[in-house]
Amino acid sequence: MYCQSLSIALTGSGGSGVMTTGSLLLEAAAKAGWYGFMSRSAGPQIRGGEAAAVVRLSSEPTESPDDSFDIVLAIDPGSMARFMAEIPLRPDSLVISDAEAGRRGGELPDVPARVLDLPMQELAKSVKGGRPNMIALGAVARMIGLPADSIHAVLGKLLKSKGADILEASWACVQTGFAAAADLPVFDSPAPASEPCIERWSITGNEAAGLGAIRGGIRFVAAYPITPATELLEWLAAALPKVGGVLVQAEDELASINQVIGASFGGTPALTATSGPGFALMSESIGLAVCAEVPAVILDVMRCGPSTGIATKSEQSDLNIALHGLHGDAPHLVVAPTSVTDCVFTTQWAVHLAEALQTAAIILSDQSLGQTRAIVKRPADVSFIAKRRVPEQFEETYYRYAVGDTGVSPMAIPGQAGGQYTADGLEHNQAGAPSSLPEDHYAQLEKRERKIRDFDYGQHWADLEGSGATAVITWGSATGPVREALSRLRENGKNIRLISLRLLAPERPDDMAAALQGVNRLLVVEQSHSRQFHRYLRAAYDLNAQVRVFNRPGPLPFRPGEIMQQLNDWDAEAELLAARNRFCSFNRRNTSRRSSRSGVPVAVILVSSAHSPRPLPACRFSPRKRLLSPALVVLRGCRPT
Amino acid sequence: MPTYLSTYGFHGVHGRALALATGLKTARPDLTVIATGGDGDGFSIGGNHFLHTCRRNPDMTYIVMDNQVYGMTKGQASPTTEPNWEKGKLTPMGTGINPFQPLVIALASGANFIARCSSSDTNGTARILMEAIRHPGFSMVQILSPCVTFRPEQRDWKHLLVPSPKEPTSDPTEAARRLLKDHGLYTGILYVGERPVYQPKLKASVAGVEAFDEEFRL
């Protein structure tokens, strides 16, 4: 969705209210008809330290950061230093600083952009109980053409709980900031959405996952607080009782997962949510859910690892543990939402799959999806709902773990007369009695594997978009920037395929083969240092194409321009190689002419590729070694001897 | 144990029986839930769950078959083993650390019913288990269960155990005094509390999940 947009960052010290300001700005802009999102960046302290609210406002729905920022409001100018890498600027970007505040609390670092001064602290002092963040909000509203009244409407809603005095002071500050911005530049704001009648929502990925869980039928949650999953739990704690469910704050993650398994054994669809460290603690018992065939949904809102890592920042590095972290042969489901909106669908789907297949379903969300608040079209209602195969009547002997045809055996619910059995994490026979016989082990391993392998996952296994011989394959939150990059390239006449995997386990070899049909170049995009996704793809699938990997660990998000650059560079190199090949074959055919030459200047190669649709500058020899060296080596080989 | 009964059972992972049982009871308050395990399971690997289940006080019964040794793995010291027991191959000089006091800790953590009995006294144990199951809240029953293989000296327990000379108390201070002075061999119901039971009400207040739409609509 390449669209008109404005990217705005608000930075401040912890407690300066940048998150509130960002939320108010997003909400007001949404009311004015725009789409957009706000993501959060905080220091490792979670409370205190520096914080940045990053807002993108656009005319179309988007979940990708832009390549750079248009406006930065450095409420505490010194705080900007921590975010230089996260807030890329252009020479024409505008940084609004507060020189006076900077003198007292840390100066603005050198920024490669225009800097203008707005005495936000001084202006705030002119209002009783006033705060600089609200001055900033008024100023930025004016700069982007947002009427002050639209701020007034959302102030009342978001600050209602803070009391009338704070509300009044905030509104006075917004007006003061609005007036003070009279001399500041005005930006071209994106056109409001063309279909204002469409129902639009303001939702975070964490809330969306919670909603998906409840829509799917989850009525029991046990969990232990952990950043960045906490908001998801807080939302569920308030929401579950309304639908007759409950959230239990457990003593640790070992308890969380086991309470979930206990509740689910009793017939109640159950979920736990956590992040990497908690997930690692759960892994033994996730294996129990697999072995005892008890549906369980585990939602991992990933953050930078390993160990405590960076608790507040996003990374796609729990893929390995989600896929391979269970001991023994423990086939289970791993799914990943591809956008904030998709957190609703994917979570609901995961509940459905776990219940239908009586196994553990792991959902890999991440901090970037979970803590981003996006303005989206209302997520569609889907019919997936928890539906467990339960025996209606019992034969003389009930075999809980009967191998059967699909591998999904009817699961009696405690209280059903005649269905008494013991669910077992020990290997067992079909009746559920512990067994160490090889034939029972083989039969049960095969049953548990077959039921998830042979299930029909339909088209939901991946988001597939576009066609063309080049494809980008990615997953999770990296999908947003990839989608925007491909959308921009499409506008330039380049059709590139998107494959974003929603179902990571079990593997779907036939579906993947179909998705890769006709693809000869495949770019893997993932946010992990050790290329976990690429290794997974290589292990699980036949990638009959040239493969390149664009990977980076967290916390920096991918930006669409970087992905375009990867694809354009690849094109340029390929053209250069093609030109070289053409030249070499030409030389081979014309040996007499070739021998008349004493050498081959590089310029000849450039001329020979000039008919290609790419303009020459893109083919210009860049200092990148990868581009230069293969061409030169071959050139030497082609040179007449 | 469920394998010997005609009932629904769950053989979970080592140490997590109480967590599993808590989840089941919370989601299905209509069920009678009993968790069982040993001293290593409940007080070592599952110690944290023991504390917090006592604290939470769900209406269920916990039976710990205490033999003061890890029998399944062939005779290592457990949390309730005496410090000078030198036959554990991992602790050939003895553990040197004081045994865990399950009933004292159960009381301090908030268990609502505390009893001790012996596997040699089947009728007495059955009577106490009935009381434990009937009593609201979390009931902790320690059943001294000799391990005749690795702790043959425990055969003598049946001669040493004596019924508690006093009636059960509902005063935690008095119960604490008795348990702290207790030599570990008094049997019977030792404490009967009246703490409120943990049981969230599972009653829907909205008609359907569409009710949440309003929260997100602009």
Image: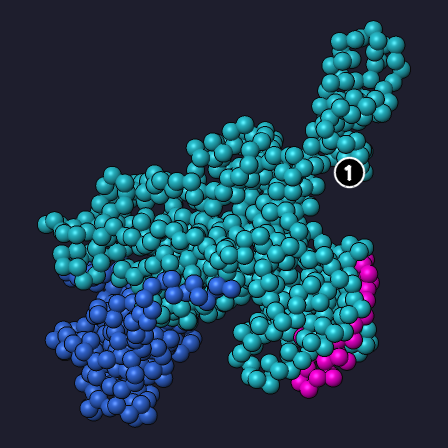
* Local SS, label 1: loop
Between residue A65 and residue A257, name the one nearer to us. Answer: A65
User: Above or below — where is A591 with respect to A260?
Assistant: above
Query: At x 26% / y 76%, what residue is drawn?
Result: B59
The shade of chain B is blue
Tell me the subunit letter for badge 1. Answer: A
Q: Nearer the viewer, residue B9 or A241?
A: A241
Residue B121 image position (x, y, % from top left): 15, 75
Residue sitting at x 72%, y 20%: A581
Q: Is residue A325 magenta?
A: no
Image x and y of residue A286, in percent? 39, 55
Q: Is residue A73 above or below residue A603?
A: below
* Amino acid, disc 1: Arg
Q: Which residues are magenta?
A: A109-134
Question: Who is closer to the viewer here, B132 or A275?
Answer: A275
Chain that appears cyan: A
Query: Which residue lies at the image location 82% right of the left edge and 73% below the top edge?
Result: A99
Query: Is residue B141 shown left or right of residue A539?
Result: left
Residue B166 visible to the viewer:
yes
Vertical order, B143 against A207 (above or below): below
Residue in the picture at 64% in, 49% down = A3
